[in-house]
Image: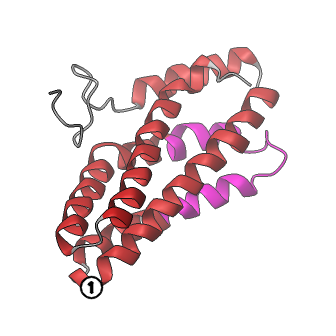
Amino acid sequence: MLRDPSLIPLSHQHQHGLALAVLIDRGLKADPSPQKATELCRMVADMFELELVHHFEVEEQVLFPALRGRLASDGILDQLISQHREMESLTSRIAAAPEAERNPLLTKFGELLSRHIRIEERQLFEEIQEKVQPEDLSELGAQIDGRLLKVCPSSGRLPWDKDPE
């Protein structure tokens, strides 16, 4: 199903999150060195601070409350909120971890981020589009768009994007 325009701003940020998860996975597989882990730790911290904190807030303060009682089960919302807290905890643990413990924490964070986004995109957003009336979804989209922090709006680039050659 095509993504409703009201949910596209969140989906764009999901793409950024999936890119980070892929960078973590491929980066550690290609180079499990402490230097690579340090680089990836910076990426996680930057992405978390620049985008994920605000993304989670918008979901928890705007999207999820509007959905309570409208879905087949509110359990999916509770699961997603729990995953937000787990990613917050992992981010703190990654930042404080000794070198020897970073790689497994980074891997766990990347896997959780990827799984979380796929649940939102493939399950939650699909159910929203099926069950929420178009006018309600449009109003919700306006609230989301008004609150969502736009990362690098002038350039469209992410902090870890390389300069074009």
Q: Going 52% across and 19% down the picture, which residue do you hit? A: 142
Q: Nearer the viewer, residue 65 or 11?
A: 11
Mark 1 closeness class: few <14, some 14–19, many ≥20 residues within 10 Å: few
* Residue 68 percent coordinates (x, y): 72, 44
Work out whether 161 lies above or below 132. Answer: below
Q: Which residues are magenta?
A: 59-85
The verdict on residue 17 being magenta is no
**Side of 69 where 38 appears, left or right:** left
Q: Amino acid at mark 1?
A: Ala
Dot 1 corresponds to which residue?
Answer: 100
The verdict on residue 62 being magenta is yes
Q: How many marks?
A: 1
Q: Going 33% across and 63% down the picture, which residue do you hit? A: 30
Work out whether 73 lies above or below 62. Answer: below
Q: Going 57% across and 64% down the picture, which residue do you hit? A: 82
Q: Nearer the viewer, residue 162 or 7?
A: 162
